[in-house]
Image: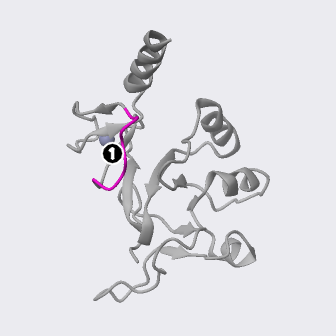
């Protein structure tokens, strides 16, 4: 199983609330604990004690977390999906912003915790990280991303506009 990958550096103290990844703890050859910890059972007092600055959870879990005061949460809101699931809408993002006032990053995670697509700090689409993600129905944007990564992106604002146009023609 692979470890959770935080979208940007430096990695803050992060709680991962799904059991899709290898457990945190000590990285090979590193003497200090990694700041990322996996809580296989989701949110609970143990996670609150860990005082995460960032949390990775499913959108379903985030909807619950909207009602939980998490004063330690100061860095990032990461929404993890399985391939084929609907991604966040603008309204969903507004909802997270209103609650936390933090950058939102989406990630698509495959079997064994493999990172398939990941949102970057430019927040315009998800960079493709693996050819194992089916992208048949996606508009793929290969234009350079302001973040500097060279990989193509799905779910870009331009792509969304284009898909809407294609849908309009198809009617
Ligand atoms: Zn980027």
Residue 25 spot, x, y in % from top left = 46, 84
Residue at the image point whose x is 28% and y is 34% from the top:
146
The chosen color scheme is one colour
How far across and down, in percent of the image, does residue 122 sit? Answer: 37, 37
The answer to whether 55 appears left or right of 34 in the picture is: right
Confirm if mark 1 falls within 8 A of ligand 1. Answer: yes
Vertical comparison of 96 with 64: above or below:
above
Q: Which residue is mark 1?
A: 127
Is residue 75 among what the camera can see? no
* Tag 1 secondary structure: strand
Can the viewer see residue 1 in this picture?
yes
Q: Quarter for ligand 1?
A: top left
Q: Nearer the viewer, residue 123 or 51?
A: 123
Numbered range of the magenta stretch: 131-138
Left or right for 85, reference 170: right
Q: Position of residue 1 (x, y in %)?
A: 41, 78
136 within the magenta span: yes
Magenta stretch prevailing secondary structure: loop
Q: Residue drawn 57% across and 45% down? A: 102
Query: Where in the figure is residue 32, as x and y percent of width and height?
Result: 39, 85
In the rendered view, does 66 fall on the left or right side of 21? right
Name which quarter of the figure residue 166 lies in.
top left
């Amino acid at each position: 199983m692979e470890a959770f990958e935080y979208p940007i550096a430096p990695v803050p103290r992060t709680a991962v609330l799904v059991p899709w990844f290898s457990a945190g703890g000590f990285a090979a050859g590193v003497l200090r604990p990694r700041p990322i910890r996996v809580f296989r059972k989701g949110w609970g007092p143990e996670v609150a004690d860990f005082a995460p600055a960032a949390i990775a959870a499913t959108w379903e879990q985030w909807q619950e977390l909207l009602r939980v005061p998490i004063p330690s949460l100061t860095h990032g809101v990461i929404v993890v999906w399985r391939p084929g699931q609907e991604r966040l809408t603008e309204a969903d993002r507004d909802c997270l912003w209103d609650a936390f006032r933090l950058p939102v990053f989406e990630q698509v995670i495959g079997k064994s915790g493999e990172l398939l697509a990941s949102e970057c700090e430019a927040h315009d689409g998800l960079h493709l990280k693996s050819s194992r993600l089916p992208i048949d129905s996606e508009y793929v944007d290969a234009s350079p991303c302001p973040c500097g990564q060279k990989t193509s992106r799905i779910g870009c604002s331009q792509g969304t506009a284009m898909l809407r146009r294609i849908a309009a023609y198809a009617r």
